[in-house]
Image (cartoon, coloured by chain):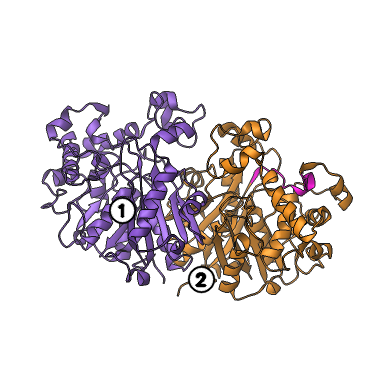
Chain colours: A purple, B orange
């Protein structure tokens, strides 16, 4: 039986500068990041024959390959969602490579909130959230939007409240995630937010949607990130240490409300828990084998639930796990988001986490985990989702 | 080397009624077609673990699997474009199956033009084409939209004019395609347009964008189509004759303007010609082995250029090839669009062509080609594109 295990590797990474207002279009940002990733891979545009993007991406492959001088694609695909798409792009790239449909595949994400607010009004900027709702609310949004659960912060607040209610998790636990990641970001020259914060700063930051405070929320960032994925065989000739995709998986269901899966019990095999089972089976490893994790962190408590979903601690024990310093670099058991994550480096819809995973494998992170052999990278751990295990 | 050759098969097909105004949402249409395909495959919703859609599809996987009672997906992806996506959905499904990322994958397309005109104004309906242009024209549309090349008919008209200029192709040749397909549709109870037409009817139908007349243009149809793809091994237990995906490919470039690739020479290996080369190599067959073809036919001359791209005749000889009756069922060398195609059965963005390909393999078409062993199905033969070879 063919599987994706160890069939593909990331050999190139590239990014733009991250900022609140880049002043460049999403097209240009994507081209800059992709070009940098191709250079980093030691390849030329003519070597690229596949593209995977988030399906919400504004850049089309046609426009990008024309601008980049990529002559011809033999594979192109998209993955549903924003934060749910991240690792799915690598899974699709690995599939194409494993079946010989493509040789060198670019995966990327580019964002410019300013541009988006002109071309697709209502998503970013432009008044209060409820003013930005379209007249006709589509899909399952119709079931919670009328009750004021409009923004991701509002939707996720209920899920995190439930975690607090069931397990005694506190907002201090959330704060310990935010502080740990900011401490990592202080060493990262690419991070947007590098000034130190304390738990007290966190606790005094304003509510966004209780129990989420401002310092629990990810940044909103302009910028782009890209990687080049190739076959295991071709990766041997790469100019940098390849990050092999030891395992990768996607999952969606069985509770099918994006973000707001209020009816899921935390012991059901859904979202991150489903993906975790798939990748551990494929990789034949367990959480204790993993040296670092880049968890999708639109909100700091997403790191808590991810720690549980991926088996680093039992359900309900993530708060104390974090409080004990386990996610801090350099001495924690499992350094998490060593670039600062979406809370402090940049919010590129989680794609920057893949790049940090690769840097850990290469040994080039600004918070380098010694002898990092195995790094977990995840998409948002609600539906849809995905994850990859990168190995040296 | 792993390839997609013969790794997957279509074991279920399903569709809604086709009409000009269905009165049902795209969500319901998709559910009806997918449910029918799952039933036809002899499976239950719980057996489905993958989904592939056109990226312009309004239906999300989340909403569909919830409504259909599909518990959990392990694979989901989208393909760029409308008519360029058709066969790419099968290629991605086959990749997922070949690598073990999914067992049974649904591919589908659902359309309701009325609903779209409410939720995404400007695409269908609502005034003249130039009134429907957004203020800011994105991507490469900015290079031809200001010159009045706004609708697909206007864009493609120039390409077909060039074919007439270079090779002496005539609008009568276009008409012979339209008449042949209508003759096929007369036998198809699912076809929207079944009243006979003559070449004279074609020649007297009004100009849409010279040299394209009304009877050269595809219908605009409400409806949905779906298929279920599974592995070669599981297909052996299917309740209907499986249509094995002997080969499949996608292509994009090197001239990267969707539809309007005015600068491509017809002897360059781009679009359909690139895909043709890939699938013939993978399948180790040549055009003469193929018993029927379902060509994407947004306009009747697309059948002419596809006949050339896929090697059924030399560049420039497609007009005389059609005039000699070669695409007509039952006596033609290569019966084409035996369901009536997008010109006479329905325009479901080409997805109905896949279903007809499967019916030919099963022996259940209303214009059944005797002993059909090998059927070609194609996406739109400009960029992006794709094709599959189905075998019994």
Q: Residue at x 51, y 58 (%)?
A: B105
Judge depth for marks 1 and 2 and give the one in front: 1
Residue B253 against residue B82 in the figure, above or below: below
Q: Residue at x 38, y 23 (%)?
A: A128
Tell whether position B215 is magenta: yes
Tell whether position A224 is magenta: no
Mark 1 to mark 2 CA distance (whole Å):
35 Å
Location of residue A336 in the rendering, given as x and y in whole percent from the top left corner: 20, 49
Q: Which residues are magenta?
A: B210-223
Location of residue A246 in the rendering, given as x and y in whole percent from the top left corner: 31, 64
Q: Nearer the viewer, residue A111 or A392?
A: A111
> Where is mark 2, residue-wise?
B233
Q: Nearer the viewer, residue A87 or A74?
A: A74
Q: Chain of mark 1?
A: A
Residue B243 against residue B123 in the figure, above or below: below
Do marks 1 and 2 share a subunit? no
Q: Secondary structure at mark 2?
A: helix
* Left or right of B164, for residue A260: left
- The disc label shown at residue A354, or none: 1
């Amino acid at each position: 039986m063919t599987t994706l295990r160890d069939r593909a590797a990331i050999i190139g990474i590239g990014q733009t500068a991250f900022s609140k207002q880049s002043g460049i279009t999403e097209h240009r940002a994507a081209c800059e990041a992709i070009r940098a990733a191709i250079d980093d891979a030691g390849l030329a545009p003519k070597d690229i024959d596949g593209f995977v993007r988030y399906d919400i991406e504004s850049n089309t492959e046609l426009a990008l390959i024309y601008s980049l001088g990529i002559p011809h694609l033999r594979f192109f695909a998209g993955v549903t969602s924003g934060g749910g798409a991240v690792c799915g792009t690598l899974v699709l790239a690995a599939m194409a490579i494993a079946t010989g449909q493509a040789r060198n595949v670019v995966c990327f994400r580019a964002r410019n909130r300013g541009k988006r607010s002109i071309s697709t009004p209502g998503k970013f900027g432009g008044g209060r959230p409820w003013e930005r709702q379209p007249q006709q609310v589509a899909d399952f949004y119709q079931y919670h939007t009328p009750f004021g659960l409009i923004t991701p912060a509002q939707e996720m607040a209920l899920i995190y409240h439930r975690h607090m209610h069931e397990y005694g998790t506190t907002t201090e636990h959330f704060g310990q995630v935010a502080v740990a990641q900011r401490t990592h970001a202080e060493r990262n020259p690419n991070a947007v937010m590098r000034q130190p914060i304390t738990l007290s700063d966190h606790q005094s930051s304003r509510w966004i949607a209780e129990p989420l405070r401002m310092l629990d929320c990810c940044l909103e960032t302009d910028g782009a990130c890209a990687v080049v994925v190739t076959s295991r065989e071709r990766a041997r000739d790469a100019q940098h240490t390849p990050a092999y995709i030891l395992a990768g998986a996607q999952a969606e269901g069985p509770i099918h409300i994006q973000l707001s899966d209020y009816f899921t019990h935390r012991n059901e095999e859904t979202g991150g828990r489903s993906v975790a089972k798939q990748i551990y089976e494929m990789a034949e490893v367990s959480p204790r084998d993993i040296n670092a994790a880049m968890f999708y962190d639109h909100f700091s408590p997403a790191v808590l639930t991810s720690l549980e979903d991926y088996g680093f601690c039992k359900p309900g024990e993530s708060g104390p796990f974090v409080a004990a310093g386990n996610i801090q670099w350099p001495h924690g058991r499992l350094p998490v988001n060593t670039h600062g994550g979406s809370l402090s480096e940049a919010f590129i819809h989680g794609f920057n986490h893949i790049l940090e995973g690769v840097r850990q494998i290469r040994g080039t992170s600004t918070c380098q985990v010694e002898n990092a052999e195995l790094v977990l990278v995840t998409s948002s751990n609600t539906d849809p989702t995905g994850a990859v295990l990168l190995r040296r």
